[in-house]
Every structure is written in structure tokens, then in C-alpha cells.
Amino acid sequence: MAQPDVSQTQLYEWLTGDDDSRMCDDIPDGACQEQPRNFFLHLSASLGNKLADELSSARLVLPWLLGIIGAPVWMVGLLVPIREAGALLPQLFVAGFIRLKPQRKWVWVAGATLQALAAALLALLALIGHGALGGGLVLAVLVMLSLARGLSSIATKDVLGKTIAKRRRGTLMGWSGSIAGAATLIAGGVLVLFGDRPGNIALAILLSVAAAGWLLNALCAARIKEVPGAVEGGENAWDSIKLGISLMREDTTFLHFNVARALLLSSALALPYLALLGQQQSGTELGGLGILVVVSGLAAMVASPIWGKRADRSSRRVMRDAAIGTAMCCLLAALIAWLPGSWTQSVLPYAGVYALLVVVHHGVRLGRKTYLVDIANQDNRALYVALSNTFTGVLMLIVGGMIGALAQWLGSAMLLVILALIALGAMLSAHRLPEAE
């Protein structure tokens, strides 16, 4: 086995804040020496994935796409549930299949490649799509993208758990979020420069860059040195469901975590409605979208390393604090919408609160990802991730539909107040979780 590069090892130790690059808690001995190299491959892969996610966001970019091609308004309400639930629901069914693979990185590569293809198709639809047919094709491609995302998600976490030590995973995800946030910031700045120019070409370019990001993700995943793992215990879909239900009953910590995670959906559901408030003031010009993309990237760049370090110390407290932040952001956005004055008729105050909520949402994501990976072990990690994600996907469809109906009836501002109350419930639930050992 080749010796690791000295400069690479030194940079790895600086980024992780530790002078022992051979700290190998909870990973196979054969993966220990490759950890610095794998760390940077994970980092590069995550950069491509996070940048692509931002540039094809169902909360920001795809609503603009549907507006530009003249799709019916009701289709916008389906974007986030399809993107989230489509990625989560099938995971329990593929967990057993992935378990049968001694090297799970190739499942990750396949998922990333399919996402790249989907982004390229969306770029094409930005140029030639029109009306209800174009909108329907966008939703169909989004289903494909989401299913591929789910395939990659479970394999990524399993490979992460096999190749990166336990007290380095949150730090890795934090740095990847920061680097991707900087890249997204640049893309948003370019959109601001487009201003009110025709948006179909700009969106096609944006989505093409997203496709390139997922190709980078696939290439880096293929180069990760993964020690072949055990393949015993692979289950078919029905056996996975039965085993998952049994785990929910027997592992009270896992069950309690999933309750907290369900309540933390409030942050994900609040983001599109907060963006909608800003969009209603600025129209569909790319300048307004650019401002929101810029603040999203800036917020990710600033927030992710902070949350990552804290998640390595206590992912439970990260989830609790992020829930408090979600409630405060939702209430602040509703208050702005109700206040008099011309300043509330601009996208800028909503963009400011959107940035704060993006910071908080990164905390939700980092906290619950780190907690879930840490409470599982090498034998059950893939199943735990798949079961938790499937459970959350079902709730996303149910709650997302209910929230959409309430928004139609109550309006976006009042809906944000309801989401703030749900976030306070998430805070109480996360506070009662035990620390991940």
C-alpha cells in the first residue's frame, strides 16, 4: 500500500484540528492509512454534490424554471415534496441490496451519474420546455433525480462510516458545506449580473453546471479506497421493512431520534415559503433569484464549519439549537410580512431572514446526519439510515400536502407561525435525546 502524501496529511491534520492523522475510531484497520486521502476525496465529492444541489434547488431554482416556461402554478407546490420524499422513500427497499455489495461506493457512483443525467435533461427543458407539458416533464425528471439521490445518499453515508473516523465526520461535512457555499456564492453573483435578461439560457447554464457537479461527485467516489465489508445480512425489501419495524420497537433512542427528525422538517418546509414571500415582491427576474442564491451560499460558507465542529462534540445539542433558530426565523419572517412600510415590499429583508434560516437548516442537517451515523455501527448503519430516511419521506409527503393546503388557506406568513410552533416541539424532543456514544 502506498504511503500517504506528507503535505496532504499535514493539511488533513490542520483541517481536522488534530495532530494524529491515524486516529481511526470505528473504521476498519485497513482504512486507517488511507484516511487523509479519502478525506479529501470525500471533500471534493461533497463539493460537487452540494453545489449541484444548490444550483438545481427545488426551493429556489426549479420554481423559477417552471415560471419561465409557463407551467401551471400548482406544479410549484409539488417540487419540494417530490425532491425530498422521492429521495427518501425508496431507501429502505435498497438497503438490503446495498448490504450485498462488499464495496458500496459503486452504488454511490451510479446514483451520482443518474443525477448528472437528470440535471442535463432539466437544462434542456429550460431551453425547449413550454406550458403544462414542459412542467410535467420537469416533474418527471425531478422524480428520476430524487430516486437517484436516494440511491447515492444511503451509499454515501455507509462509505463515510467505513472510511472516515467517528470524530472526523462532522468536521468533514462542515468543511464541504463551506467550500460548496463559496462556489454557490459565485454562481449567485453571476445571476445577479444577469438581472432582468432572458432567464432560460441562464438557467440552462446553471443546470449544466449542476450536472458537472454530480459528475465530479461520481469521479471522486470511484477513487475512494474502500475496504470490502461484510455482505452477510442482506435482506429483501419486505424483510428490511420487518427488521426496521422491529428496530423501531427495540431501540428507543433510534425511535426518539426519528420523532425529533420528523419535527425538524419544519426548517425544510419553511424555506420555500420564506422564498415565496420574497418572490412575491421581486417577481421572477433572475436578479431576485440571484440575491437568494448569494445569501444561501454565503450562509452555508459561514455556518457549516461551526456546526460541523459542534456536531462532533454534541450532535444532539446542534439539533436542539437549530430547532430554536428555526422557530425564531419563521416568526421573524411572518412579522416582517405583517409590518407596514415600503421596506417590507422588497426582496431584501426576506433574503436576510432566508440567509439566517439557511444557517439554521445546515445545523439541522449536520446534526441529524452526524447523530444517525454515530448511533449506528458498521453492521446496521445502512439499514438505520435507510429506515430513518424512508420514515421521514412518508412524513414529508403527508405533512407537505397538509402544509400546502394550509398555505392556500392561511397564506405564507401565518403558515410560518405554525411551522415555528412545530420547531419548538423539535427543540423539546431533541433536548431529551441521549448523547450519541
Image (cartoon, grey):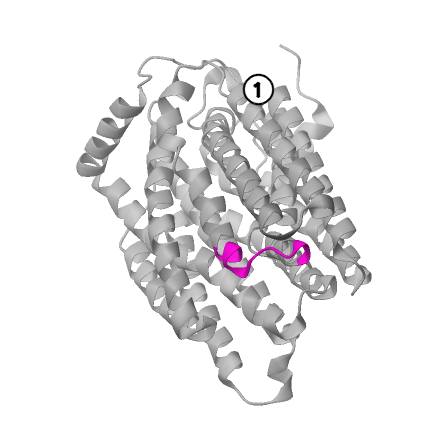
Question: The C terminus is located in which quarter?
Answer: top left
Foreground pick, 136 / 147: 136
Q: Is residue 32 visible?
A: no
Q: Residue 96 in the image: state x and y as whole percent.
A: 36, 21
Q: In this picture, is 36 found above or below 287?
A: above
Q: Residue 273 in the image: state x and y as whole percent.
A: 50, 65
Count of number-bearing discs: 1
Q: In this picture, is 389 found above or below 347?
A: above
Element under label 1?
loop
Q: In this picture, is 364 found above or below 420?
A: above
Foreground pick, 299 / 405: 405
Q: Residue 230 in the image: state x and y as whole percent.
A: 39, 13
Residue displayed at 49% across by 20% down: 104
Residue 191: quadrant of the picture: bottom right
Q: Tell which residue pokes out farthest to the top in this image.
A: 1
- On whether residue 212 falls in the magenta region, the answer is no
Q: Tell which residue pokes out farthest to the bottom in this image.
A: 340
Task: Please name the amino acid that badge 1 sits on.
Answer: Gln
Q: In this picture, is 238 found above or below 314?
A: above
Residue displayed at 45% across by 53% down: 364
Q: Is residue 299 visible?
A: yes
Q: Residues within 10 Å of mark 1 (few under 14, many from 20)?
A: some
Left or right for 129, reference 350: right
Q: What type of secondary structure mainly makes up the magenta span? A: helix
Question: The N terminus is located in which quarter?
Answer: top right
Residue 109: quadrant of the picture: top right
Q: What residue is shown with label 1?
A: 33
Query: Which residues fall within the magenta stretch?
Result: 68-77
- On whether residue 75 falls in the magenta region, the answer is yes
